[in-house]
Image (cartoon, rainbow, N blue to C red):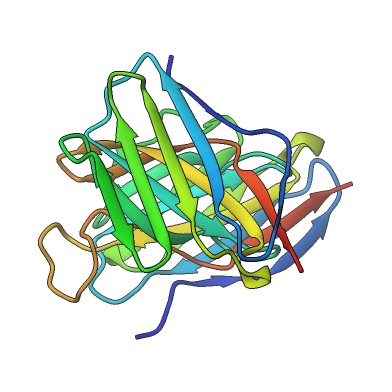
Amino acid sequence: EAGVAQSPRYKIIEKRQSVAFWCNPISGHATLYWYQQILGQGPKLLIQFQNNGVVDDSQLPKDRFSAERLKGVDSTLKIQPAKLEDSAVYLCASSPPRGLAGGYSYNEQFFGPGTRLTVL
Amino acid sequence: SQKIEQNSEALNIQEGKTATLTCNYTNYSPAYLQWYRQDPGRGPVFLLLIRENEKEKRKERLKVTFDTTLKQSLFHITASQPADSATYLCALDLSTGGGNKLTFGTGTQLKVEL
């Protein structure tokens, strides 16, 4: 089974520029998450999608961050304009619908490798 | 607001010993608690989930306990190996109707030495 794919893996930009990250979740996973992980901290949820609808975006800085999940599959996260404090790893995760068979607990999340963003 | 505390200092132990990591939380009563492993440059990987009505869960050399009175979870790795060296994250599960919402601790870095 293919895992969660993310691109790019690394990105360096200057402050005030814009950047976009892409995520392809595991096939059949209805829920998709974007997390921000600052060095030395745990992941912090930015936004959660259920299919193509937003379930929770309470911690998304909406003045500069936006995310979409067209057709309920792939998702993009955009930052415009970027600030120095946006330097972090951006992780995408997905989870299966509750009760989906496959040998794993229905509440676990599967993470991609992340995109490391450096804002100069 | 919810607060999750894990040992902020790295834990160094000798190969073969049991590693015990602590996760304490306040102001919340989670239905589930999860533990993840994270290696440098990679995303977290799910290890174990324990429900509020379960005291203990085991998987191979891993054991998790969950004390809802103390608001604490302990994560044990028995017969530790250098390959167990990683950062371990605990996460509270704020389940919603549309999926599960995780709040992560800061993680504890474990180093298993020969």
Judge left or right: residue A88 versus residue B96. right
Which one is in front, A35 or A49? A35
Q: Quadrant of residue B112?
A: bottom right
For residue A97, above or below residue B26? below
Q: Residue at x 43, y 49 (%)?
A: B35
Taking the image as drawn, is residue B91 in sight? yes
- In x, y percent, where is residue B23? 48, 33
Q: Nearer the viewer, residue B90 or A91?
A: B90
**Looking at the image, which is closer to me, B74 or A80?**
B74
Q: Quadrant of the C terminus of chain B?
A: bottom right
With B66 as the anchor, is A89 left or right in this view?
right
Q: Residue furthest front?
A: B16
Total number of numbered labels? 0
Q: Position of residue B44 (x, y in %)?
A: 52, 59
Horizontal relation, residue A27 to residue B106: left or right: left
Q: Residue at x 81, y 37 (%)?
A: A84
Q: Nearer the viewer, residue A56 or A63?
A: A56
**Which residue is rendered at x = 38% and y = 40% of the image?**
B102
Measuring 36% from the left and 61% from the top, which residue is drawn there?
A: A94
Q: Residue furthest right?
A: A120
Residue A76 appears in the picture as rendered: no
Residue B26 in percent (x, y) is at 42, 17
